[in-house]
Image: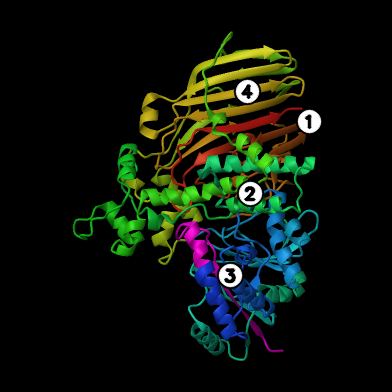
Amino acid sequence: MKKKLHVVFKTHLDIGFTDLAEKVTIKYLDDFIPRALTIGEALPKKFVWTTGSWLIDFYLNHPEVTKKDKKRMEQAIKNGIIKWHGLPVTIHTELMDRRLFEYGLSISNALDLKYNQQTIAAKMTDVPGHSIAIVPLMAQAGLKYLHIGVNASSAIPNVSEMFVWRAKDGSEVIVHYAQDYGETFMHDGWQDMLYFAHSHDNQGPPKDAAEVTELFAELAEEYPGVEVVASSLDEFAKAAWVKKDTLPVIEEEIADSWIHGVASDPKKVADYKILLDLRDTWIESGAMAIDSQEYRDFSEQLMLIAEHTWGGNGNVFLPDYRNYRLADFKKAREKDKITFNHNRNTMDFADLMALISTNIDNKADANRRSYRLYEATWEEQRDYVNKAITALSNGHRKEALEAVDNKRTVIKPLENITEDVVPGKTYQFDGISLVFSTTGGLNQLEINGHNLLKDGKEFGKLSYERFDFANYNNYLSKYSRLTNRTSSWALVDFAKRGIEAYQEIRHEVLVPSIEQSSIKCKGKAVEVNFDLVFKAHEQEQWGVPKKVRLTYQINLIMKEIAGSLKWNDKQANRMPEAYWLETSLTVANPYRWKMSKLNEKLSPYNVVANGNRNIHALTKEGLTYQGIEGNLTINSFDAPLFSFGRRGLLNFDNQQPSLNDGIYVNLYNNTWGTNFPAWFEDDMLFRFGAKLA
C-alpha cells in the first residue's frame, strides 16, 4: 500500500503578543482568512487551512464581516478548504474550570452540527503541557487526538512522541508531541505520515497559491513514491486512532510549565475567579442557563482570559536591559520611548544586549519600543474581565460589578482594639489551640489533639522573594532548550536580561513584622487581625506594599479558618520578584493530599518528569486530604497557584517534595521576561482558608 503524507497548513494564533490584540484580530479578519480562502479556491486539491474553532466562529459572527464574505467562508467549509480543530484557542487549561473548558469544546461541537462535520482532532501550540483533567472532557466531546507543538526553547515533558493519555475514569485521547509548533511525523509500520506547514506567531497562511504549489513540488521530490495530500488533523487522527493499541499508555499528570505566568496580573485573575464563582451560583440557582446567549457571550470573554497570550513581545516592545532599579525604572517609564546608542564602538552592556535580541536599526519598530504601549498590551488583556461583565444581563452585571469593586481592597484602621495578639502565646478555644508567630502566621495549630503545624511550618505567613541572575542561570540550564536559533529571543522570554549588571539584584526572602494586632472572641467565632509592615529601606528599594492587613476569621463550631490578606501601596517594580502566602498543614501521610484541577482531584505526586512538578493552578476546591486527622481542605480563592514543598519559582529540578515540607500560594510574580505583565502596582485582596474537621 502506498504511503500517504498528510500536509496540514496552520498558523499559530496569538491574540496579541506580536501587536495589540485588536490589531491582530483585524489582521486575521481582513488579510489572513481572505487569503486562505483565495488560495483554497485556486488550489482546492492542495490547500486546507486549519485553525482553532474560536477563530472560525469569531469570523462568522463578526458584525463587520459582510454577508458575502460569510457565505464565502461557509462555502469553503463545505468544500473542505477551511477546517477547525476541536479546541477554541491555545489555552492555559489549568486556569480553567470544567464548565469553562466545556464551553470551549462546545464551539467546535456547534460548528460541527451546523456544517455537518465530525471533528475528532485538536491542537495546542507553545504551551508545553496541560492537565490530564481535560482528557475525560475531550473524550466526551468526541475528540480522539491532541497535537501539542511545544515552544522551541521550552522543556518537553518526558513522554513518548505519541501516546495514549488515559484518565482515571478510563477515557482516552491520543496525544502527539512535537519539539516545535509542528514537525514531520513518521512511524515504522505506519502508512500515514504528517507534515505541518506551520507558520509561526500570527504569520498567517502562505502568501499565495504559488507558494503552496512550490511546497508540494518540494515534498514530492523529498518523499518519492508517497501520496502527498492536502489534509486535516482529523484525517491523520483517524489513521492514528486505528493504531491506538500499539501506543504506550500514560496515566500521569503532565501539567503546565508556563503556568506561573498567570500570577503576573493578580487583579485580573482574582476578578476572573470571582466571575467563575458567580456563574456557578447563577447556574445552580436557575438564574442562568447554559444554553443561553448570555452564558455563551459571558463564557467567551472568560475563556479569552485563559488564552495563552497575556501581553506583548518583550523583545519588540521593551528591549530595555538597563532600567531595573526603582528610580531608574520610574524615569524610563515616564520618558516612555526606548532609545539606543547605535555606535558599536561605544555601546554599553544594555545596548549590546538589545542589539543581540532585536534589530535596533529598524526604524519601523521605533514607535513600538514604548513602556506605555507595552502596558497597553496587558491592559487590553485585562479588559476581557470588563467585556465579560458587559455581556451579562442587567441584574447579573450589577452583581458582578459589586463583586469585583476595588473598595474591597481598602485597608481601614483597626478600631476598638481590646486585646493585642502576643506572638508565642497559646490561645485555647473549644478543641482548637493556636499560636501566632512574629510574622502573623500561625506556627502552632492543634485540632482535637492533632498538631497540624510542625518543624517551623506556618499557615498564613506572607513572604517576599527576590531573584537574581544565578536563579535564572540555574533555571535556564535545566529548563530551556537553548540553541543558536532560539537563544536571541529565549534569553529575554524566559529571563530578565541585564540584571546581572546590578549587584543589588540578588536572591533574598523577606518577611514583614507585626505593627499592630487585635484578637476578638464572640460566641463561637474568633477574629484575628494583623497590620504587617516591611522595613522602610525594603519599601524604598523594592517597592513592597506600605500597608498589609492579614485577617483570620475562625469558626469554632465548623473548625474552619477564613483568611484574607490585603496589600495597599505596592510600587511597580521591574526587578524579578514574588509574593508568597504559606498555607502549610502537617499531616501523618502527606501522600493522601489531592489537588483539584478543572474540578478533578489528582495526586500532586503523580506528575511526569519535565512536566511541572513545582507549581500547579488549582480550581476552587483547592487541596483536600483524608486521614487520621480527619478531612482537611486548603483553599486559595483568588490566587490559584500552589507550590508544594518549597517556593518553587525558577526551579526545574524535577523533584517532588513532600507537602509536609511546605505548601505555598504564589500571590504574584513577574519572573517571565515576555508575554506576561512585567510589573504590578494595584491594591489587592487575597482570600484563603482551611477546613480542619
The question of residue 296 being in magenta is answered with no
Residue of label 4 = 552
Q: Is residue 364 visible?
A: yes
- Observer-nearest of 369 and 122: 369
Q: Viewer-nearest of labels 3 and 4?
A: 3
Callout 1 amino acid? Ile
The question of residue 26 being in magenta is answered with yes
| Above or below for 359 versus 317 | below
Q: Which mark is residue 690?
A: none
Helix, strand or loop status at disc 3: loop
Residue of label 1 = 628
| Above or below for 285 versus 71 | above
- Observer-nearest of 631 and 477: 631
Residue of label 3 = 66
Callout 2 amino acid? Ala
Q: Position of residue 521 (x, y in %)?
A: 67, 13
Q: Residue at x 47, y 44 (%)?
A: 670
Q: Residue at x 73, y 56 (%)?
A: 251
User: Is tag 3's residue or tag 2's residue first in the polypeptide sequence?
Assistant: 3
User: Is tag 1's residue or tag 3's residue first in the polypeptide sequence?
Assistant: 3
Gap in angstroms between the C-alphas marked 2 and 4: 35 Å
